[in-house]
Amino acid sequence: MIKKYIQENEGRMLEELFSLIRIPSVSAQQAHKPDMLRCAERWKELLLMAGADKAEVMPSDGNPMVYGEKMVDPKAKTVLIYGHYDVMPAEPFELWNSKPFEPEVRDEHIWARGADDDKGQSFIQAKAFEYVAKNNLLKHNIKFILEGEEEVGSPSLGAFIEKHKELLKCDVILVSDTSMIAEDIPTLTTGLRGIAYWQIEVTGPNRDVHSGHFGGAIANPINVLCKLIADVTDADGKIGFPGFYDKVEEAGSDERKMLASIPLDIDAYKKAIEVDELFGEKGYSTIERTGFRPSFDVCGIWGGYTGDGAKTVIPSKAYAKLSCRLVPHQDYKEVAQLVIDYFKRVAPKSVKVDIKFLHGGQGYVCPIDMPAYKAAEHGIEMVFGKRPLAARLGGSIPIISTFEQILGVKTVLMGFGLESNAIHSPNENMPLSMFRKGIEAVINFHLEYDKMGN
Ligand code: BES
Ligand code: MN
Ligand code: MN
Protein backbone atom coordinates (compact mmCIF):
# COMPACT_ATOMS: atom_id res chain seq x y z
CA MET A 1 0.00 0.00 0.00
CA ILE A 2 2.56 2.54 1.16
CA LYS A 3 5.11 1.49 -1.46
CA LYS A 4 2.46 1.67 -4.16
CA TYR A 5 1.46 5.18 -3.12
CA ILE A 6 5.06 6.37 -3.21
CA GLN A 7 5.63 4.72 -6.58
CA GLU A 8 2.47 6.11 -8.17
CA ASN A 9 3.09 9.62 -6.87
CA GLU A 10 6.84 9.80 -7.33
CA GLY A 11 6.78 11.94 -10.47
CA ARG A 12 4.61 14.58 -8.81
CA MET A 13 6.58 14.43 -5.56
CA LEU A 14 9.86 15.02 -7.37
CA GLU A 15 8.40 17.94 -9.32
CA GLU A 16 7.28 19.49 -6.02
CA LEU A 17 10.70 18.96 -4.44
CA PHE A 18 12.34 20.45 -7.52
CA SER A 19 10.17 23.55 -7.22
CA LEU A 20 11.78 24.13 -3.81
CA ILE A 21 15.29 23.36 -4.99
CA ARG A 22 15.01 25.77 -7.95
CA ILE A 23 14.73 28.64 -5.47
CA PRO A 24 18.36 29.35 -4.48
CA SER A 25 17.72 30.04 -0.79
CA VAL A 26 21.36 30.57 0.23
CA SER A 27 21.16 32.12 3.69
CA ALA A 28 24.82 33.16 3.82
CA GLN A 29 24.59 35.44 0.77
CA GLN A 30 22.85 38.80 0.87
CA ALA A 31 22.05 38.60 -2.86
CA HIS A 32 19.66 35.75 -2.15
CA LYS A 33 17.57 37.63 0.42
CA PRO A 34 14.45 37.71 -1.84
CA ASP A 35 14.77 33.98 -2.46
CA MET A 36 14.33 33.28 1.24
CA LEU A 37 10.78 34.63 1.26
CA ARG A 38 9.99 32.93 -2.06
CA CYS A 39 11.16 29.61 -0.68
CA ALA A 40 9.18 30.07 2.53
CA GLU A 41 6.03 30.88 0.49
CA ARG A 42 6.54 27.80 -1.64
CA TRP A 43 6.91 25.63 1.46
CA LYS A 44 3.65 27.04 2.79
CA GLU A 45 1.85 26.03 -0.42
CA LEU A 46 3.39 22.57 -0.30
CA LEU A 47 2.34 22.02 3.33
CA LEU A 48 -1.23 23.00 2.47
CA MET A 49 -1.21 20.71 -0.57
CA ALA A 50 0.13 17.88 1.61
CA GLY A 51 -2.84 18.14 3.97
CA ALA A 52 -2.07 20.80 6.58
CA ASP A 53 -5.26 22.56 7.78
CA LYS A 54 -3.26 25.69 8.35
CA ALA A 55 0.09 26.97 7.13
CA GLU A 56 1.67 30.37 7.25
CA VAL A 57 4.82 32.29 6.64
CA MET A 58 5.70 34.05 9.88
CA PRO A 59 8.10 36.91 10.40
CA SER A 60 11.17 36.54 12.63
CA ASP A 61 14.11 38.82 13.40
CA GLY A 62 15.76 37.31 10.33
CA ASN A 63 14.47 35.17 7.48
CA PRO A 64 10.80 34.15 7.70
CA MET A 65 9.68 30.93 9.38
CA VAL A 66 7.14 28.54 7.90
CA TYR A 67 4.61 27.05 10.27
CA GLY A 68 2.02 24.42 9.40
CA GLU A 69 -0.22 22.07 11.33
CA LYS A 70 -2.80 19.36 11.19
CA MET A 71 -4.60 19.09 14.50
CA VAL A 72 -6.66 15.93 14.80
CA ASP A 73 -7.41 16.19 18.50
CA PRO A 74 -6.27 18.91 20.88
CA LYS A 75 -5.95 16.31 23.65
CA ALA A 76 -3.76 13.98 21.58
CA LYS A 77 0.03 13.97 21.45
CA THR A 78 1.77 16.36 19.10
CA VAL A 79 4.84 15.75 16.97
CA LEU A 80 6.68 18.88 15.86
CA ILE A 81 8.69 18.42 12.68
CA TYR A 82 11.65 20.78 12.29
CA GLY A 83 13.63 21.36 9.11
CA HIS A 84 15.46 24.15 7.31
CA TYR A 85 14.77 25.57 3.88
CA ASP A 86 18.05 27.46 3.56
CA VAL A 87 21.03 25.89 1.85
CA MET A 88 24.79 26.37 1.82
CA PRO A 89 26.39 28.42 -0.98
CA ALA A 90 26.94 26.28 -4.09
CA GLU A 91 30.36 27.69 -5.01
CA PRO A 92 32.64 26.63 -6.66
CA PHE A 93 30.09 26.28 -9.48
CA GLU A 94 32.58 24.89 -11.99
CA LEU A 95 32.98 21.69 -9.98
CA TRP A 96 29.32 20.73 -10.45
CA ASN A 97 28.42 18.21 -13.16
CA SER A 98 24.99 19.81 -13.51
CA LYS A 99 23.75 23.18 -12.30
CA PRO A 100 23.21 23.25 -8.51
CA PHE A 101 19.79 24.94 -8.66
CA GLU A 102 18.54 23.02 -11.71
CA PRO A 103 17.78 19.64 -10.16
CA GLU A 104 18.24 16.54 -12.30
CA VAL A 105 17.71 12.84 -11.83
CA ARG A 106 20.66 10.85 -13.19
CA ASP A 107 21.75 7.33 -12.28
CA GLU A 108 18.91 7.00 -9.80
CA HIS A 109 20.09 10.05 -7.80
CA ILE A 110 18.73 13.56 -7.42
CA TRP A 111 21.56 16.06 -8.08
CA ALA A 112 21.25 19.59 -6.69
CA ARG A 113 22.16 21.90 -3.80
CA GLY A 114 19.65 20.94 -1.12
CA ALA A 115 18.88 17.49 -2.62
CA ASP A 116 19.75 16.23 0.86
CA ASP A 117 20.52 19.15 3.23
CA ASP A 118 17.80 19.88 4.01
CA LYS A 119 15.24 20.31 1.25
CA GLY A 120 15.32 16.65 0.22
CA GLN A 121 15.20 15.41 3.80
CA SER A 122 12.54 17.76 5.11
CA PHE A 123 10.50 17.02 1.98
CA ILE A 124 10.60 13.33 2.95
CA GLN A 125 8.85 14.43 6.15
CA ALA A 126 6.28 16.42 4.18
CA LYS A 127 5.44 13.50 1.91
CA ALA A 128 5.13 11.04 4.80
CA PHE A 129 2.80 13.57 6.41
CA GLU A 130 0.81 13.75 3.15
CA TYR A 131 0.22 9.99 3.23
CA VAL A 132 -0.98 9.81 6.82
CA ALA A 133 -3.02 13.01 6.52
CA LYS A 134 -4.77 12.16 3.24
CA ASN A 135 -5.60 8.62 4.33
CA ASN A 136 -6.92 9.80 7.69
CA LEU A 137 -4.50 7.56 9.54
CA LEU A 138 -3.38 10.08 12.13
CA LYS A 139 -4.19 9.87 15.81
CA HIS A 140 -1.67 12.52 16.86
CA ASN A 141 -1.27 16.12 15.81
CA ILE A 142 1.52 17.18 13.51
CA LYS A 143 3.15 20.60 13.41
CA PHE A 144 5.87 21.80 11.06
CA ILE A 145 8.40 24.52 11.67
CA LEU A 146 10.88 25.35 8.91
CA GLU A 147 13.55 27.98 9.30
CA GLY A 148 15.72 29.80 6.77
CA GLU A 149 18.89 30.37 8.81
CA GLU A 150 20.14 26.99 10.00
CA GLU A 151 23.27 27.14 7.87
CA VAL A 152 24.24 30.46 9.46
CA GLY A 153 23.73 29.29 13.04
CA SER A 154 19.95 29.87 13.53
CA PRO A 155 20.33 33.40 14.95
CA SER A 156 16.57 34.12 15.04
CA LEU A 157 14.97 30.80 15.92
CA GLY A 158 15.67 30.91 19.67
CA ALA A 159 13.73 34.16 20.14
CA PHE A 160 10.98 32.86 17.80
CA ILE A 161 10.52 29.68 19.86
CA GLU A 162 10.43 31.76 23.05
CA LYS A 163 7.77 34.05 21.56
CA HIS A 164 5.65 31.24 20.09
CA LYS A 165 5.96 28.64 22.86
CA GLU A 166 2.21 27.88 22.80
CA LEU A 167 2.07 27.51 19.03
CA LEU A 168 5.06 25.17 19.02
CA LYS A 169 3.93 23.16 22.05
CA CYS A 170 4.55 19.48 21.42
CA ASP A 171 5.50 16.16 23.00
CA VAL A 172 8.44 15.34 20.80
CA ILE A 173 10.35 16.83 17.88
CA LEU A 174 11.16 14.86 14.75
CA VAL A 175 13.98 15.93 12.42
CA SER A 176 15.35 14.56 9.16
CA ASP A 177 18.63 16.46 8.77
CA THR A 178 21.33 13.92 9.64
CA SER A 179 22.74 10.84 7.99
CA MET A 180 23.08 7.08 8.20
CA ILE A 181 26.40 5.23 8.22
CA ALA A 182 25.39 3.44 4.99
CA GLU A 183 22.22 2.38 3.21
CA ASP A 184 22.76 -1.17 4.47
CA ILE A 185 23.77 0.05 7.96
CA PRO A 186 20.64 1.96 8.95
CA THR A 187 21.30 4.43 11.73
CA LEU A 188 19.46 6.70 14.10
CA THR A 189 21.41 9.73 15.24
CA THR A 190 21.71 9.86 19.02
CA GLY A 191 24.15 12.71 19.35
CA LEU A 192 25.23 15.89 17.64
CA ARG A 193 28.31 17.94 18.38
CA GLY A 194 28.21 21.54 19.49
CA ILE A 195 30.16 24.20 17.68
CA ALA A 196 32.05 27.44 18.23
CA TYR A 197 33.32 29.62 15.40
CA TRP A 198 35.76 32.57 15.33
CA GLN A 199 37.53 34.89 12.95
CA ILE A 200 41.06 35.92 13.79
CA GLU A 201 42.86 38.94 12.35
CA VAL A 202 46.61 39.43 12.76
CA THR A 203 48.07 42.84 11.95
CA GLY A 204 51.76 43.53 11.40
CA PRO A 205 53.02 46.73 9.73
CA ASN A 206 50.45 49.42 8.93
CA ARG A 207 50.77 48.69 5.18
CA ASP A 208 52.10 45.92 2.95
CA VAL A 209 55.86 46.50 2.86
CA HIS A 210 58.83 45.46 0.71
CA SER A 211 60.01 42.04 1.90
CA GLY A 212 63.63 42.95 1.14
CA HIS A 213 63.61 46.18 3.11
CA PHE A 214 61.86 44.62 6.09
CA GLY A 215 62.26 40.84 5.71
CA GLY A 216 63.97 39.42 8.79
CA ALA A 217 63.44 42.58 10.82
CA ILE A 218 59.70 42.48 11.54
CA ALA A 219 57.16 39.77 12.26
CA ASN A 220 55.17 38.65 9.23
CA PRO A 221 51.48 38.36 10.24
CA ILE A 222 50.93 35.32 8.01
CA ASN A 223 53.93 33.51 9.52
CA VAL A 224 52.70 34.41 13.00
CA LEU A 225 49.13 33.27 12.27
CA CYS A 226 50.33 29.95 10.88
CA LYS A 227 52.46 29.34 13.98
CA LEU A 228 49.64 30.36 16.32
CA ILE A 229 47.35 27.87 14.62
CA ALA A 230 49.92 25.08 14.29
CA ASP A 231 50.80 25.31 17.99
CA VAL A 232 47.20 24.58 19.06
CA THR A 233 47.42 20.84 18.31
CA ASP A 234 50.28 18.53 19.24
CA ALA A 235 51.60 15.54 17.32
CA ASP A 236 49.01 13.28 18.99
CA GLY A 237 46.15 15.45 17.80
CA LYS A 238 45.44 16.84 21.31
CA ILE A 239 44.08 20.37 21.41
CA GLY A 240 46.12 22.67 23.63
CA PHE A 241 43.72 25.42 24.77
CA PRO A 242 44.03 25.27 28.59
CA GLY A 243 40.81 23.91 30.09
CA PHE A 244 39.46 22.78 26.72
CA TYR A 245 38.95 19.14 27.77
CA ASP A 246 37.79 19.88 31.33
CA LYS A 247 34.12 19.11 30.69
CA VAL A 248 34.58 16.45 28.02
CA GLU A 249 33.05 13.21 29.23
CA GLU A 250 34.84 9.97 28.41
CA ALA A 251 32.66 7.27 26.85
CA GLY A 252 32.08 4.39 29.27
CA SER A 253 33.59 0.97 28.49
CA ASP A 254 30.21 -0.48 27.44
CA GLU A 255 29.61 2.41 25.13
CA ARG A 256 33.13 2.07 23.69
CA LYS A 257 32.47 -1.63 23.04
CA MET A 258 29.24 -0.75 21.28
CA LEU A 259 31.06 1.89 19.22
CA ALA A 260 33.77 -0.57 18.29
CA SER A 261 31.08 -2.88 16.89
CA ILE A 262 29.84 -0.25 14.40
CA PRO A 263 30.98 -1.61 11.05
CA LEU A 264 32.46 1.57 9.60
CA ASP A 265 34.41 0.65 6.47
CA ILE A 266 37.64 2.62 6.98
CA ASP A 267 39.01 1.80 3.52
CA ALA A 268 35.85 3.05 1.83
CA TYR A 269 35.89 6.12 4.13
CA LYS A 270 39.43 7.00 3.02
CA LYS A 271 38.81 6.14 -0.61
CA ALA A 272 35.69 8.30 -0.88
CA ILE A 273 37.71 11.42 -0.06
CA GLU A 274 41.03 10.15 -1.48
CA VAL A 275 43.18 10.39 1.61
CA ASP A 276 45.85 7.74 2.22
CA GLU A 277 45.87 7.93 5.98
CA LEU A 278 43.50 9.23 8.62
CA PHE A 279 44.66 11.58 11.38
CA GLY A 280 43.09 12.34 14.71
CA GLU A 281 43.44 12.27 18.46
CA LYS A 282 45.63 9.37 19.58
CA GLY A 283 43.86 6.60 21.46
CA TYR A 284 40.44 7.00 19.82
CA SER A 285 38.77 5.31 16.86
CA THR A 286 37.36 7.27 13.92
CA ILE A 287 33.80 6.83 15.20
CA GLU A 288 34.91 8.11 18.63
CA ARG A 289 36.84 11.01 17.13
CA THR A 290 33.81 12.35 15.29
CA GLY A 291 31.07 11.41 17.75
CA PHE A 292 32.63 11.70 21.20
CA ARG A 293 35.69 13.93 20.92
CA PRO A 294 35.98 17.62 20.15
CA SER A 295 37.98 18.93 17.21
CA PHE A 296 39.72 22.13 16.10
CA ASP A 297 39.86 23.19 12.45
CA VAL A 298 40.82 26.12 10.31
CA CYS A 299 37.92 26.62 7.88
CA GLY A 300 39.66 29.31 5.82
CA ILE A 301 42.86 31.33 5.81
CA TRP A 302 43.90 34.27 3.68
CA GLY A 303 46.17 37.29 3.36
CA GLY A 304 49.05 38.65 1.34
CA TYR A 305 49.63 38.30 -2.36
CA THR A 306 47.75 35.49 -4.09
CA GLY A 307 47.66 36.72 -7.70
CA ASP A 308 49.69 35.61 -10.73
CA GLY A 309 53.44 35.32 -10.54
CA ALA A 310 55.49 36.57 -7.61
CA LYS A 311 55.30 39.74 -5.55
CA THR A 312 57.88 40.29 -2.85
CA VAL A 313 55.87 41.68 0.00
CA ILE A 314 55.24 41.34 3.72
CA PRO A 315 51.51 41.77 4.17
CA SER A 316 50.00 44.04 6.74
CA LYS A 317 47.25 41.57 7.64
CA ALA A 318 46.45 37.87 7.86
CA TYR A 319 43.09 36.29 8.62
CA ALA A 320 41.62 32.92 9.43
CA LYS A 321 38.24 31.36 10.21
CA LEU A 322 38.56 28.93 13.10
CA SER A 323 36.10 26.44 14.48
CA CYS A 324 35.77 23.80 17.15
CA ARG A 325 33.31 20.95 17.20
CA LEU A 326 32.32 20.36 20.81
CA VAL A 327 30.84 17.44 22.66
CA PRO A 328 27.98 17.42 25.15
CA HIS A 329 28.84 19.12 28.47
CA GLN A 330 31.33 21.42 26.79
CA ASP A 331 29.68 24.83 26.83
CA TYR A 332 30.23 26.79 23.63
CA LYS A 333 30.26 30.15 25.47
CA GLU A 334 32.97 28.97 27.86
CA VAL A 335 35.01 27.54 25.01
CA ALA A 336 34.48 30.72 22.97
CA GLN A 337 36.08 32.72 25.78
CA LEU A 338 38.91 30.39 26.65
CA VAL A 339 40.03 30.29 23.03
CA ILE A 340 39.95 34.10 22.82
CA ASP A 341 41.92 34.36 26.08
CA TYR A 342 44.46 31.84 24.82
CA PHE A 343 45.21 33.62 21.54
CA LYS A 344 45.43 37.01 23.27
CA ARG A 345 47.86 35.59 25.81
CA VAL A 346 50.18 33.73 23.44
CA ALA A 347 50.22 36.36 20.68
CA PRO A 348 53.70 37.86 20.28
CA LYS A 349 54.06 41.61 20.90
CA SER A 350 55.38 42.00 17.35
CA VAL A 351 51.80 41.83 15.96
CA LYS A 352 48.29 42.80 17.03
CA VAL A 353 45.79 39.97 17.32
CA ASP A 354 42.07 40.55 17.16
CA ILE A 355 39.77 37.56 17.52
CA LYS A 356 36.00 37.68 17.28
CA PHE A 357 33.46 35.02 18.13
CA LEU A 358 31.03 34.54 15.21
CA HIS A 359 28.56 31.92 16.36
CA GLY A 360 28.13 28.79 18.43
CA GLY A 361 25.71 26.21 19.74
CA GLN A 362 25.44 23.32 22.15
CA GLY A 363 25.59 19.64 21.36
CA TYR A 364 22.76 17.19 21.92
CA VAL A 365 22.24 13.64 23.17
CA CYS A 366 19.08 11.65 22.45
CA PRO A 367 17.87 9.03 24.93
CA ILE A 368 17.09 5.68 23.30
CA ASP A 369 14.37 4.54 25.67
CA MET A 370 11.61 7.01 24.85
CA PRO A 371 8.54 5.97 22.81
CA ALA A 372 9.26 8.23 19.85
CA TYR A 373 12.77 6.80 19.52
CA LYS A 374 11.33 3.29 19.57
CA ALA A 375 8.77 4.28 16.94
CA ALA A 376 11.58 5.57 14.73
CA GLU A 377 13.55 2.39 15.34
CA HIS A 378 10.60 0.22 14.27
CA GLY A 379 9.79 2.47 11.37
CA ILE A 380 13.30 2.15 9.99
CA GLU A 381 13.59 -1.56 10.67
CA MET A 382 10.38 -2.23 8.73
CA VAL A 383 11.84 -0.59 5.62
CA PHE A 384 15.59 -1.23 5.85
CA GLY A 385 15.25 -4.78 7.16
CA LYS A 386 17.61 -4.20 10.08
CA ARG A 387 17.33 -2.54 13.43
CA PRO A 388 19.07 0.81 13.17
CA LEU A 389 22.29 1.41 15.10
CA ALA A 390 22.42 4.28 17.54
CA ALA A 391 25.24 6.59 16.44
CA ARG A 392 26.50 9.98 17.49
CA LEU A 393 27.42 12.05 14.48
CA GLY A 394 30.03 14.73 14.18
CA GLY A 395 27.84 17.46 12.68
CA SER A 396 25.84 20.10 14.54
CA ILE A 397 22.27 21.34 14.62
CA PRO A 398 22.56 23.79 17.52
CA ILE A 399 18.87 24.61 17.58
CA ILE A 400 18.04 21.09 18.81
CA SER A 401 19.39 21.90 22.27
CA THR A 402 17.61 25.27 22.20
CA PHE A 403 14.30 23.46 21.59
CA GLU A 404 15.05 21.27 24.59
CA GLN A 405 15.88 24.25 26.80
CA ILE A 406 12.83 26.32 25.86
CA LEU A 407 10.14 23.73 25.16
CA GLY A 408 11.50 20.98 27.41
CA VAL A 409 11.15 18.30 24.76
CA LYS A 410 13.53 15.82 23.19
CA THR A 411 14.23 15.41 19.50
CA VAL A 412 14.41 12.19 17.49
CA LEU A 413 16.94 12.53 14.68
CA MET A 414 15.64 10.35 11.87
CA GLY A 415 18.08 11.22 9.11
CA PHE A 416 18.25 9.70 5.65
CA GLY A 417 21.43 11.28 4.33
CA LEU A 418 24.58 9.39 3.40
CA GLU A 419 28.19 10.55 3.49
CA SER A 420 28.30 10.16 -0.29
CA ASN A 421 25.47 12.69 -0.65
CA ALA A 422 28.17 15.37 -0.45
CA ILE A 423 26.24 17.94 1.58
CA HIS A 424 27.86 21.40 1.55
CA SER A 425 30.03 20.18 -1.39
CA PRO A 426 29.73 20.33 -5.17
CA ASN A 427 27.48 17.61 -6.63
CA GLU A 428 25.25 17.25 -3.60
CA ASN A 429 22.86 14.38 -4.24
CA MET A 430 20.30 12.02 -2.79
CA PRO A 431 19.76 8.45 -3.99
CA LEU A 432 16.12 7.90 -5.02
CA SER A 433 16.24 4.70 -2.97
CA MET A 434 16.85 6.71 0.22
CA PHE A 435 14.16 9.21 -0.74
CA ARG A 436 11.61 6.40 -1.13
CA LYS A 437 12.73 4.47 1.96
CA GLY A 438 12.76 7.66 3.98
CA ILE A 439 9.14 8.46 3.18
CA GLU A 440 8.09 4.92 4.01
CA ALA A 441 10.05 4.85 7.27
CA VAL A 442 8.56 8.16 8.46
CA ILE A 443 5.03 6.96 7.60
CA ASN A 444 5.78 3.90 9.75
CA PHE A 445 7.06 6.20 12.49
CA HIS A 446 3.70 7.97 12.67
CA LEU A 447 1.73 4.71 12.69
CA GLU A 448 4.00 3.13 15.32
CA TYR A 449 3.98 6.25 17.49
CA ASP A 450 0.19 6.10 17.65
CA LYS A 451 0.28 2.43 18.64
CA MET A 452 2.59 3.25 21.55
CA GLY A 453 0.36 5.91 22.99
CA ASN A 454 3.56 7.53 24.31
N1 BES B 1 22.31 18.93 8.41
C1 BES B 1 23.52 19.50 8.88
C2 BES B 1 24.05 18.84 10.14
C3 BES B 1 24.41 17.38 10.05
C4 BES B 1 24.67 16.75 8.85
C5 BES B 1 24.51 16.67 11.21
C6 BES B 1 24.99 15.41 8.80
C7 BES B 1 24.84 15.35 11.18
C8 BES B 1 25.08 14.70 9.97
C9 BES B 1 23.29 20.98 9.14
O1 BES B 1 22.58 21.60 8.10
C10 BES B 1 24.61 21.69 9.21
O2 BES B 1 25.29 21.75 8.22
N2 BES B 1 24.93 22.25 10.37
C11 BES B 1 26.04 23.10 10.52
C12 BES B 1 25.79 23.94 11.74
C13 BES B 1 26.48 25.26 11.76
C14 BES B 1 26.29 26.10 10.55
C15 BES B 1 26.09 26.01 13.01
C16 BES B 1 27.31 22.29 10.66
O3 BES B 1 27.29 21.19 11.23
O4 BES B 1 28.33 22.75 10.17
MN1 MN C 1 20.96 20.53 7.55
MN1 MN D 1 24.03 21.97 6.44
Image (cartoon, helix red, strand yellow):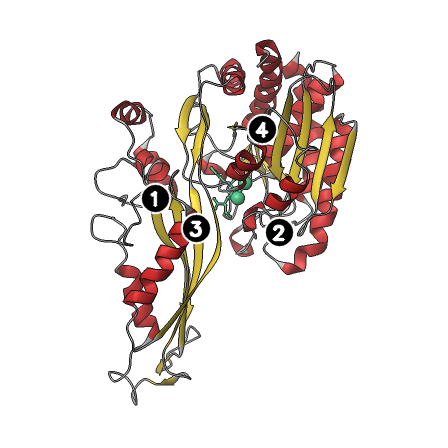
**Eyeballing the image, is 365 above or below 2?**
below
**For residue 265, side relative to residue 43 (left or right):** left
Residue beneath the point at 51% across and 14% down: 378
**For residue 324, side relative to residue 114 (left or right):** left
Alpha carbons under labels 2 and 4: distance apart? 25 Å
Disc with the residue nearer the chain's start (1 vs 2): 2
Cβ–Cβ below 8 Å for labels 3 and 2?
Answer: no
> Label 2, on which residue?
26
Disc with the residue nearer the chain's start (2 vs 4): 2
**Eyeballing the image, is 99 above or below 217?**
above
Tag shown at residue 333: 3
- Of the residues shown, which amino acid type is indicated by label 3? Lys
> Label 1, on which residue?
294
Question: How many other residues sit within 10 Å of disc 4, few (<14), some (14-19) or many (≥20)?
Answer: many
Ligand 3: does it lie within 8 Å of the C-beta at label 2?
Answer: no
Alpha carbons under labels 3 and 2: distance apart? 27 Å
Alpha carbons under labels 1 and 4: distance apart? 26 Å
Mark 3 or mark 1: which is in front? 3
- Of the residues shown, which amino acid type is indicated by label 2? Val
Disc with the residue nearer the chain's start (1 vs 4): 4
The N terminus sits in image quarter: top right
Cβ–Cβ below 8 Å for labels 2 and 4?
Answer: no
Can see residue 335? Answer: yes
Ligand 2: does it lie within 8 Å of the C-beta at label 4?
Answer: no
